[in-house]
Image (cartoon, rainbow, N blue to C red):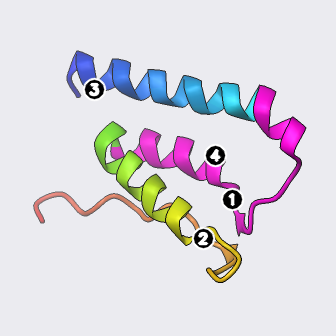
């Protein structure tokens, strides 16, 4: 992983952690999915890197609405090496 990618990932995860500590408690637990969208985002970025993790997070956030799904929705595993 390049230095730029590592720094970007840390900045994104730090922003998510800030959300979890300061904004989310004020809004209450409203996420339709488990794990929560912010936990999903942090895990997706940690497992897939900033670009792919952000894409997975965006897809998850677009599914999170009253007519969308709900329930257990874990971060998918990274693709197998060589594929």
Q: Which residue is mark 1?
A: 35
In what quadrant of the picture does the C terminus appear? bottom left
How many angstroms separate mark 1 from mark 2 (CA)? 7 Å
Looking at marks 4 and 3 on the same chain, the residue that comes earlier in the sequence is marked by 3
Residues 29 and 39: in front is 29
Which residue is at 47% across, 54% downward?
57
**Residue contact at pointers 1 and 2, CB within 8 angstroms:** yes
Q: Is residue 40 magenta?
A: yes
- In the rendering, which numbered label is found on residue 58? none
Task: Tell me residue 40's x, y (percent).
Answer: 58, 52
**Is residue 61 left or right of 31 when viewed as pictured?**
left
| Tag nearer the camera, 4 or 3 | 4
Q: Which residue is mark 3?
A: 5
Number of residues whose C-alpha sits closer than 10 Å to that of mark 4, classed few (under 14), some (14–19) or many (20 or more): some
Q: Which residue is mark 4?
A: 38
Looking at marks 2 and 4 on the same chain, the residue that comes earlier in the sequence is marked by 4
Looking at marks 1 and 3 on the same chain, the residue that comes earlier in the sequence is marked by 3
Q: Is residue 79 above or below residue 68?
A: above
How many angstroms separate mark 1 from mark 3 (CA)? 25 Å
User: Circle 4 — which element?
Assistant: helix
Number of residues whose C-alpha sits closer than 10 Å to that of mark 3, classed few (under 14), some (14–19) or many (20 or more): few
Q: Which residue is mark 2?
A: 73
**Residue contact at pointers 2 and 4, CB within 8 angstroms:** no
**Is residue 56 left or right of 38 when viewed as pictured?**
left
Q: Is residue 35 above or below residue 38?
A: below
**Is residue 83 left or right of 69 when viewed as pictured?**
left
**Residue contact at pointers 4 and 3, CB within 8 angstroms:** no
**Residue contact at pointers 1 and 3, CB within 8 angstroms:** no
């Amino acid at each position: 992983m390049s230095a730029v990618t590592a720094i970007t990932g840390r900045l994104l995860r730090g922003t998510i952690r800030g959300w979890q500590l300061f904004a989310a408690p004020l809004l209450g637990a409203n996420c339709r999915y488990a794990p929560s969208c912010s936990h999903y985002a942090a895990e997706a970025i940690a497992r897939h890197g900033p670009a792919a993790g952000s894409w997975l997070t965006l897809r998850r956030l677009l599914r999170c609405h009253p007519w969308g799904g709900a329930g257990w929705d874990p971060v998918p595993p990274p693709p197998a090496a060589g594929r």
